[in-house]
Image (cartoon, rainbow, N blue to C red):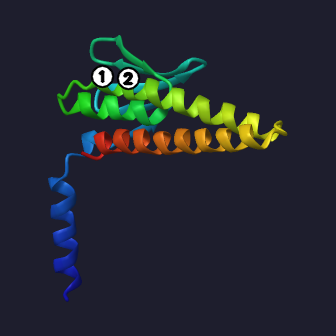
Amino acid sequence: MNTDVLIRDLEDIVNSMDLSLLPYQKGNSIRIKNFAIRKNSQGFMIYDCENNRLIAKTHFKTSAIAIAKNLANQRDIVKEVQNLDRALLKHYNDAIFFKHKIKGNCNLLELESRKIRLSVSVDETYKIRHTIEELIFD
């Protein structure tokens, strides 16, 4: 194929894309259109830079990006993502707890029970994380 044709086709594709929805890092924040995501000691904060106000707080960066990207597309899914974020935090903390309890346990019955509960928590964590990622790439 002719390279000039390929270059022209690639330029057409890039020019047709809405590049304002691509996240980029500026300073200590991630920007998506007019929304900024900043990390602090309590998690991630999503700000509307146009109106200079706090939109939401999340515990995980994935949740914050899902909220900002959907708000940039005029879809308000803040409550849904915050509920998923809380469930993700619960199962994440459960997994850490059960992993710690497995290390210090001698009783075989309790050990097997905690391994099963750890497995359930890890599976739920993956499911919720996948749901949040679907909201980002939707």
Task: Judge from the rendering whether residue 117 lies leftward or rightward of residue 125; answer left or right.
Answer: right
> In the rendering, at what x and y percent does residue 132 appear?
36, 38
- Mark 1: few, some, or many residues within 10 Å (few <14, many ≥20)? many
- Identify residue type, mark 2: Gln
Q: Nearer the viewer, residue 7 or 53?
A: 53
Q: Which element type, helix, strand or loop, lies under badge 1?
A: helix
Label pair 2/1, CB-CB below 8 angstroms: yes
For the view shown, which residue lies furthest in the bottom direction?
Answer: 1
Image quadrant of residue 4?
bottom left
Point out residue 44 in the picture as x, y percentages from the top left corner. Answer: 49, 24
User: Camera-side residue: 98 or 79?
Assistant: 98
Of 8 and 134, nearer the camera is 134
Horizontal side of 92 relative to 86 (left or right) equals right
Q: Secondary structure at mark 2?
A: helix
Residue linked to disc 1: 78
The residue lying at 52 percent from left, 28 percent from top is: 89
Rendered residue at 49%/45% (across/down): 123
The total number of labels drawn is: 2
Residue farthest toward the front in the current orientation of the protein: 109
What is the quadrant of residue 74 in the picture? top left
Please identify the quadrant where the C terminus is shown: top left
Q: Give amino acid for label 1.
A: Val
Q: Position of residue 23 (x, y in %)?
A: 37, 40
The residue to which callout 2 is attached is 82
The quarter holding residue 31 reads: top left
Q: Is residue 28 visible?
A: no
At a point 61% along the width and 18% down the height, the residue shown is: 41
Q: CA distance from mark 2 to mark 1?
A: 6 Å
Q: Is residue 69 visible?
A: yes
Residue 1 image point, x, y percent: 20, 89
